Amino acid sequence: MSILARYVPTHYSQINQHLTGVYYVASQISEVSPRYNLGNKLSRLVKAFDRAGARRTSSCIATASTTASLGIPDDSIDYVFTDPPFGENIYYADLNFLVESWHRVLTNPAPEAIVDRFKGKGLPEYQRLMQRCFEEYRRVLKPGRWITVVFHNSRNAVWTAIQEALLAAGFVVADVRTMDKQQGSYRQVTSTAVKQDLVISAYKPNDGLEERFALEKGTEEGAWDFVRTHLGQLPVFVRKGGRVEVVNERQPHLLFDRMVAFHVLRNVAVPLSIGEFLSGLAQRFPERDGMVFLPDQVAEYDGKRAAVEDVAQIEIFVVDEVSAIQWLKRHLSRRPQSFQEVHPQFLREIAGWRKHEKLPELSEMLEQNFLYYDGAGEVPSQIHGYLSTNFKELRKLPKDHPALRDKAKGRWYVPDPNKAADVEMRRARILLREFEEYRRSPQRKLKLFRLEAMRAGFFKAYQDQDYATIVSAAEKIPEAVLQEDQKLLLWYDQALTRTGAAT
Ligand SMILES: C[S@@+](CC[C@H](N)C(=O)[O-])C[C@H]1O[C@@H](n2cnc3c(N)ncnc32)[C@H](O)[C@@H]1O
């Protein structure tokens, strides 16, 4: 009903003939009358809203900034779905300026959560505004209930900022996956934003976890309480096309990361090292297909799993040390191998390695994360299992049989959960030594370094309440790397707050 409507002689209907996504007034226009535009629609709208019950349910539509309180009571909302701005791609308030001026009602751009350098809004400001919005969502949501956050962006730093904001507001992230939208929106097709959307599912901690945690904070019991509550929230069995899907969040290392984040964001020292965590986890909770379950969940999983052929493996792209270790782990658990066998395959995998991150030698990575059988003593059960399944002549032999030992010698294998704790502790020591070297290095900015060593160093310094070390080490890291690394950022933000350097 505006002069944006073009006159298109080849079309019978002159409704909705505006060009989408732009302000374009054509030389020939067809400003249609309300009656012509809405006449037919009106009867259909009345019908739609007249469906049984539709009139009786009460609904409320509000237009306001999420940073403002709308007077919604605490703990009263069942579910939140949000599609927040994703950084710098669209300037909503500015785009609306023309139309809003006509109506003489302008959007207040101050709390608008976007990155806009002309308004002095950088990534930190964006993150802070998003955090305020998430805090409001958290306040009104009932405990244990979920928020779904849709996200589309090409920049990792914005992605990290959103997650940081979500965690800092007190949510616990339980799942991140991609969403296939049937149709890309106009901006998505034309701008640099990624075509794949991501969906984050997070929840507000429930069952009095926060209250209990306030009493147990910094104790091992507090940490296990979190893990138990978190496991209770995660999906137990996900099936897709006849195969079981691995629920990433149930993997031991991710559980450790979540537990750490939960503590750090509540400004509490983390009571367990990675080694203690992994062995404690193995003692307390059953594991299936690389996923950890609560005892009562595992029965359900086993029952449903029995009816399904196999587990859909997530494809691993080796881009950094963490994914390289994951790749090696999967590779070696299928087939324990010697260095010479793994090496060529490994070289093929590392084509996508991130430039700034130092690539440790394969030999170093094997030594720091895996175990080696040198031919002495009994053959470890993982190698034994592999050999006796694949070689007929090695079947049913005792574990110290010379033929078996000979074939097993020189192979690297994945430590079982009990030994994993020792291996992790040894690795942590090596990483800390490297961090120490970076810290002492006279270089102002480090060009190439081991991200895992940096993370280990930040973690240790946080535990020691040595925030100055975190801040000074962070200065040595290129800004973009710091902004894109959720773990480093987690400790860095805390360190800034503690040292009073945060604005
Ligand atoms: C990605 S868009 C949502 C698009 C919507 N889902 C749709 O399909 O039309 C993000 C929206 O968040 C709004 N927004 C920005 N800052 C906000 C704030 N502080 N509170 C509430 N909404 C905000 C923007 O105006 C924009 O409309």
Image: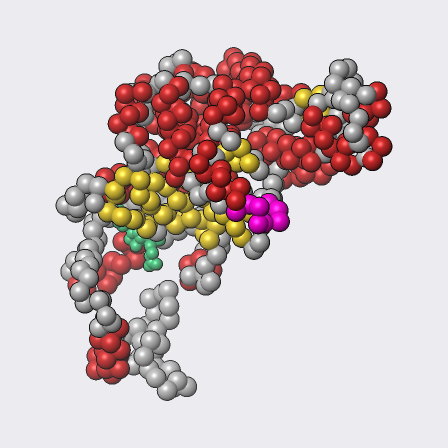
Where residue 92 sits: x, y (%)?
Answer: 30, 54
**Picture residue at 22% right of the left edge, 67% below the top:** 54
Left or right: residue 318 versus residue 11 is right
Say if residue 16 shows up in the picture.
yes
Kindly indicate the quadrant of the structure image that contains residue 162: top left
**Magenta span contains residue 408:** no
Quarter of the N terminus within the rendering: bottom left
Where residue 222 sits: x, y (%)?
Answer: 36, 22
Kindly indicate the quadrant of the structure image that contains residue 449: top right
- The residue range painted magenta reads 304-311
Left or right: residue 490 versus residue 420 is left
Where residue 438 sits: x, y (%)?
Answer: 53, 17
Of 148 and 354, the residue lying toward us: 148
**Picture residue at 34% right of the left edge, 40% below the top:** 203
Where residue 248 sits: x, y (%)?
Answer: 50, 39
**Picture residue at 49% right of the left edge, 18% below the top:** 276
Of 485 and 239, the residue lying toward us: 239
Q: Is residue 149 above or below residue 410?
A: below
Quarter of the C terminus within the rendering: top left
Q: Is residue 387 above or below residue 17?
A: above
Q: Main secondary structure of the magenta part?
A: loop
**Picture residue at 25% right of the left edge, 42% below the top:** 142
